[in-house]
Image (tube, grey):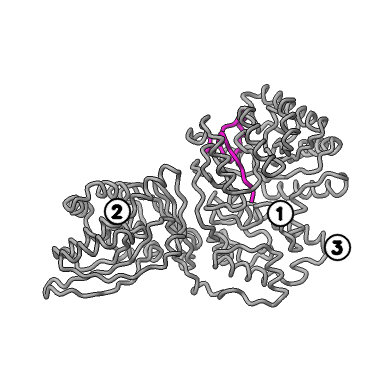
Amino acid sequence: MSVEVRPLGAKCNLSCSYCYQDKERRNRSNNSNKYSITKIINSIEVLDEPFTLFGGEALLTPKADLEKLWKFGFEKFGSNRIQTNGLLIDLECIELFHKYNVHVGVSIDGPEQLNDARQFRDEKNTLNATRKIIENIKLLCQHNIVPSIIVTLHRLNGVDSALENLKTWITQLEKLGIKNVRLHILEVDNEQVRKELCLSSSENIALFKSLMEFEENSLKTLSFDLFNEIRALLVGQDKDVSCVWHACDSYSTQAVQGIDGNGQFSNCGRTSKDGINYIKAETEGFERYLSLAVTEQSDGGCKGCEFFFACKGQCPGTAMGNDFRKRSEYCSVWKELFNTSENYLNKRKVNTILSENKGDSITVQMVEYWKAGKNIPIYFAKYLVDKNADPIGSSDLDKYSSLIWRVSWKGQKEMSIWKQRFPLMSKACCIAKCSLIAKGYIKHLSALVSIQYLDEVISFCNSQNITLKTKELNLNHYRQQLEIEDLFVEITVEKDREADKVQQVELDSFSAVELVSKIVKDNSAIYIGDLKTATIVEKAHLNVFWKEFGICTAGIELDFFLRELSGLGFESEAVFIKELLTGRLIVSSVNNVLEINSQMLRMLTFDHRLVDCNLKFNFTS
């Protein structure tokens, strides 16, 4: 796991036109000068892992605070790391680098105009900044601090004479003693970047192949880690490859753990496509990869791809249409590089996963572990295949427990407020519905209620001559999917109004996935059911997805229900429920993966039955 400490969030002294943190940086809450070194260190202590100072631009942090962090890191881990654009490096920084054993990584796309996408104020200042960064790289090497380099490839440095200039510059880096250059393919988050900088698939393929040949024929001590990683994946030695090849989960990004300025844990910045730095989900999941494994390539999946065991759809940050549920938009590039590397290894008589015909069997093992909520590396899957080990489960997706929701909160504030509200609202909803049963307005209910309030619900039902049936749910299941400590009990109630007799009826559990699979939308109304016989449903009632939290008013007119709540003394809960059920809600299903996005959190689940249900709705009151 890579731990990225971001004291100043996405704040930066450059304005890179292709920066994946652009939306996050525009959100002022992600660029505060306020931070707590104490809270940051406390969070590092919890993870107990070495860390990298990151940004934005990490060197905007005052040197006195940098020294506090590096002193801590050196005493605890023996070394430190920083990723920087290099513009602010000076002799004082170099002294700190030496003192606290700081490895330096510099992001730069080449000399002169090759680096113009990494803008500093205006064209003249950008050129001067690029020259200053290159001088600072030389300064580092002169003081025996040899940095690694990250180069993002695009139209300004990857075609024609610009590519030749890039190669010449890389040769100069090798002479300085630099040994590692990481090549990044361009991550496109807006159409202007796509138009001005993005290379076509054929151009990218030609570029990477040219650099592959350049490395083999012209470089002696410097290497591009991308090509080394692809070859390692093909032979099943993926222990040390980068995060983009490890089935990254956008909700938890286990390979990258962010720590923000207030000590809050967050995900990799490449997942913040809407500018929101979500809190990391408490459990890891592999909905994307289960989906890619069974979805046709024509629909954005990877079904049938011989390199899926190695690539896994690549980084969700480069997914088609910026939808993490689909494979990388650079799929054709990766396929060609894997194919070229496979041929490279075959010519050298190196055994590979494919030459041993183990690719499909390894994929089966991976899928079974993903279904169990676990991720395994290729080398372990290969070990299982070599031992003829049976998959841990069934390859039949019909037997996969699909309705497991995972939650990622939009911020610490939202989480602290709404985690306390949900148990209160579930209790209020349950008691109000029991009241409506006693009054004869509804016949039955099936509800979730927090265990801590169960006695209160039972007491109310007894006062109304209503009995209820309870079923304790799988507590670990609900702790994982809802991340709320006040766990739920499912209760069922029914009252025969004519005979005034109590009946105990256990209803089928609610399925949000089954509901969304039936939703059809036109330009004027939302429907449930077949379009020809559909019933118009009020927007608030479509928030029945909140039943996963014990909140649902489906089948009851909202204002009427809120009045019942208030009449029972639940005025505050009524306000919370109205805010919840009339707030903005986006429901989307793409290739088996259903996501619900609200004002305080997002929820995710996988269900193979949604393979033909590519829907997206935006509900607002």
Residue located at (76% from left, 33% from top): 98
Q: Residue pushed farthest top?
A: 124
Residue in front for this viewpoint, 102 or 372: 102
Task: Sort mark 3 into few (<14), some (14-19) or many (20+) by Cα contacts within 10 Å.
Answer: few
Q: Across the whole image, how many numbered discs are drawn on residues?
A: 3
Mark closest to the chain's N terminus, 3 or 2:
3
Task: Give the residue at mark 3.
Answer: 347
Q: What's the residue type where badge 1 is placed?
A: Val
In the rendered structure, find residue 21 and report the number of the disc placed on it. Answer: none
Q: What's the residue type where badge 2 is placed?
A: Met
- Segment tinted magenta in the rendering: 1-25
**Above or below: residue 193 compared with residue 127:** below
**Where's residue 192, x and y in %?**
57, 37
Residue located at (85% from left, 62% from top): 347
**Above or below: residue 383 compared with residue 320:** below
In the rendered structure, find residue 241 and report the number of the disc placed on it. Answer: 1
SS at mark 2? Answer: helix
Q: CA distance from mark 2 to mark 1?
A: 46 Å
**Is residue 170 part of the magenta span, yes or no?**
no
Q: Which mark lies nearer to you, 3 or 1?
A: 1
Q: Which mark lies nearer to you, 3 or 2?
A: 2
Task: Give the residue at mark 2.
Answer: 425
| Horizontal side of residue 119 vs 490, given as left or right | right
SS at mark 3? Answer: helix
**Where's residue 275, x and y in %?**
50, 41
SS at mark 1? Answer: loop
